[in-house]
Image (spheres, rainbow, N blue to C red):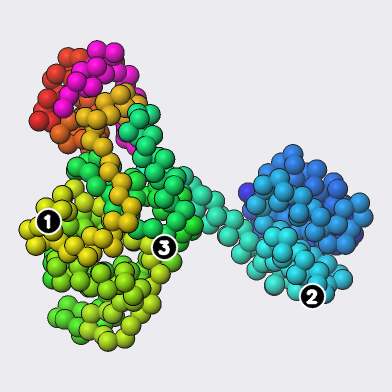
Amino acid sequence: MKKILLIEDEEPIRRVLSKILTEENKGYQIIESEDGKDGFLKLTKEDYDLVLCDIKMPKMDGVEVLQKVRENGVNIPFIMLTGHGNISTAVEAMKAGAYDFISKPPDLNRLLTAVRNALETKNLVAENIKLKKRIAKKYKIIGESEAIDQIHIMIDKVAPTDARVLITGKNGTGKELVAHHLHQKSKRSGASFVEVNCAAIPSELIESELFGHMKGAFTSAIKDRPGKFEIANGGTLFLDEVADMSLAAQAKVLRALQENKINRVGSEKEIKVNVRVISATNKDLSREIDNGKFREDLYHRLAVILIKVPPLSDRKTDIPLLVEYFSESLAADQGVDQKPFSKDALQKLMDYPWTGNIRELRNVVERLMILGSNPITINDIEQFASKSK
């Protein structure tokens, strides 16, 4: 049931509005308040889904109630009501963070529509917050080793800028986690983070994927399609496994970075783009350049800042924390009990070479959670972890 707080000093108006709202939707619970001061006290004691608030009231006016609520960090939507409506009052209320502004006597259809829209917006905001928390947890960088501390220091320094970053490291070390953190801590965090795995896209399609295409540009181009540069406009474009990009695509990416312009495949029209590019590779780009497989001029464009993600073998003290994080996450995702690891079992995991790095460790933890005993012992490690080799 949606709780709506109605703050209005005129009792007949409160009664009429309350009746209209409850008849419109049986899922609305209306709580009435006779002045701004009482309404604000109610807001400090209980959670509400929406506030309908008069502006001109004794003790505390509606704009002051809204301002005090916002100062307390509460983002509940406010629909302001006034019989003294004018442009300056509306502007003041909207600047203070009101969702909508309706003059009294209100048009009932407009009022009911505003209430429905405000409640839907609140639901969308709540879902968005949940999604962001879920994403933040998924891409959390786990560890307290010196190597990980240095990664965090570098991210904090680089993220607020628009500098391009090249992330290097072996497979499974967590390069994509660094890319996500750079985006989330940047001034572009409210815009899109668009990822392209250059190794997973056939060379003949990579240009279309990055720059888009026009209908009829090639056999399967049945309609106009924007590329990742356009989709990421205003945000961040993450080019994963950038060393696997064809030389032809590299030339076009270089031009895009130099001029901040792209052309869709099959079109001569230039499209301006504003994108921060973060790239990653597990290859030695110096060797790729020497072998003629990667453009040196593109390398210098991409590698303004270099961040090297260490292998797990260089941060083994983080393994107990990683094991705890993975076992907790897997237990929650799969609906099973979390199993503790004995000291000997953890030490055995710390002694492993982990050629597959963090990705391999996660796979082993998942296998142990499913097949191992409770608690997980060194015998479980020897029986099940070795099968990852």
Q: Secondary structure at mark 3?
A: loop
Quadrant of the rendered image containing residue 265: bottom left
Q: Which residues are magenta?
A: 325-353
Q: Nearer the viewer, residue 259 or 353?
A: 259
Q: Position of residue 65 (x, y in %)?
A: 79, 53
Q: Secondary structure at mark 2?
A: helix
Quadrant of the rendered image containing residue 240: bottom left
Residue 316 seen in the figure: yes
Q: Position of residue 210 (x, y in %)?
A: 26, 69
Q: Which mark is residue 235?
A: 3
Tell me which amino acid carries mark 2: Ile
- State the residue position of label 1: 288
Q: Secondary structure at mark 1?
A: helix
Tell me which amino acid carries mark 1: Glu
- Among the two numbered marks 3 and 1 on one chain, the one whose residue lies closer to the N terminus: 3
Look at 81% across and 49% down and name the residue there.
39
